[in-house]
Amino acid sequence: MTSLTPPAPRRRRAAFAAAAIALALLVPAATLLAVDVYLHRKYARSAGYNVWGYRGPIAGAKAPNEYRVVMLGGSTAYGYGVNADEAIPAVLERDLARRSPRPVRVINLAYNNEGVYSFVYTLRDYAYLDYDLVILYEGYNDLTMPAGPNLSVFRHESPVFRLTGYLPIFPIVFKEKAAAMLHGGDAGALYRDSDKTVFRPGLAARVAAGALQATAEAGSAAERGLGHVATEPARAIRDSGRTGCSGDWRHYCEPMRMAIEQALDRGKQVIVVTQPYVWLEGKSHERHVDQQTELAGMMTRLYASNRRVQYVNFGQVVDTRDTALSFDGMHLTPDGNRRVAAAFVAPVLRMVNR
């Protein structure tokens, strides 16, 4: 009878081959993880996010009697152009420490370019933070309609995040560095139309930028290989007809309503905010005012009698044409962020005391 067991040398060769394959996969992965954790730490204060994908220190378990707030929004809530401790959520937390009868933690769950569509994803992703109050602070990134709704959900572009909750940072760091090389030191060009930039980089800068972009894309491609085990349905906004908003703004109001309802269903409180009125090319003041008028109407129709929901209008809190308060007509300077944070204190304290 022929034995089905390979001779010992063959078994040893098979084991060696299996170990070699495992090392070939695990060692690069471990090295990449170590680099990624290092980059998270390096850029945590300046422009990055922590390993769990939000800006600022990692929030542990809630302290006794702690009241926990999460702020969702786009780049103005995230604090584009300022350090993490100068962004609105961080300043608000310090302001509340002087005024609140109980400890308050404010966690920054915003990210650049995200609109209201992303809110239901973010609330679900970070339910484990056990927050008490949700602040929904976005309208700027939804002014693109009727060109099309903003369906960006940045964190969900990463299969690693969808599977584990860990959000790699090295692809975005490398892409921003490449953008800075190609646009005269302006990393923000990554988030804008390239035809607005007139800087012409030299050959060395183009080569270095190309290498960074290629490395970032390789990392992103490796992530996408996991996509088949972390699939999601196609993104779309389906108008329920419940908001009463008109025209283009139905596709702004409906995701906002869905986020509010999701928070309420989980027993949370909600503050919905009109941001300081924008003055920015392509995102006109008049259009923003129109959008927020529709939002205010929805809030009155649906939530005027709900004590767990507040709507506040910060449209006039900061004049975004003042260069001491806004460096581009939308994003705020540290002084501008301090004004908005100060305006938040009273609405948040009302919720804390309910």
Image (spheres, grey):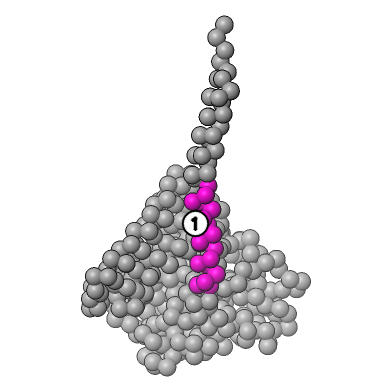
For the point 36% across and 63% down, the residue is: 212
Quarter-of-image position of residue 307: bottom right
For the point 57% across and 88% down, the residue is: 342
For the point 53% across and 24% down, the residue is: 10
158 relative to 321, above or below? above
Q: Is residue 182 magenta?
A: no
Q: Position of residue 299 (x, y in %)?
A: 50, 73
Which residue is under mark 1?
Answer: 32
Q: Is residue 28 magenta?
A: yes
- Range covered by the magenta-colored residues: 26-44
Quarter-of-image position of residue 203: bottom left
Q: Nearer the viewer, residue 74 or 3?
A: 3
For the point 56% across and 57% down, the residue is: 165
Residue 320 visible to the viewer: yes
286 relative to 116, above or below? below
Q: Position of residue 117 (x, y in %)?
A: 44, 63
Quarter-of-image position of residue 345: bottom right
**Secondary structure beneath disc 1?**
helix
| Image quarter of the N terminus | top right
- Categorize mark 1 by other alpha carbons within 10 Å: few (<14), some (14-19), many (20+): some
Residue 54 visible to the viewer: no
Identity of the amino acid at label 1?
Leu
Q: Nearer the viewer, residue 244 or 264?
A: 264
| Image quarter of the C terminus | bottom right
Q: Position of residue 298 (x, y in %)?
A: 47, 72
**Image-based side of 93 in relation to 241, left or right:** right
Q: Nearer the viewer, residue 25 or 192?
A: 25
**Image-based side of 263 in relation to 151, left or right:** right
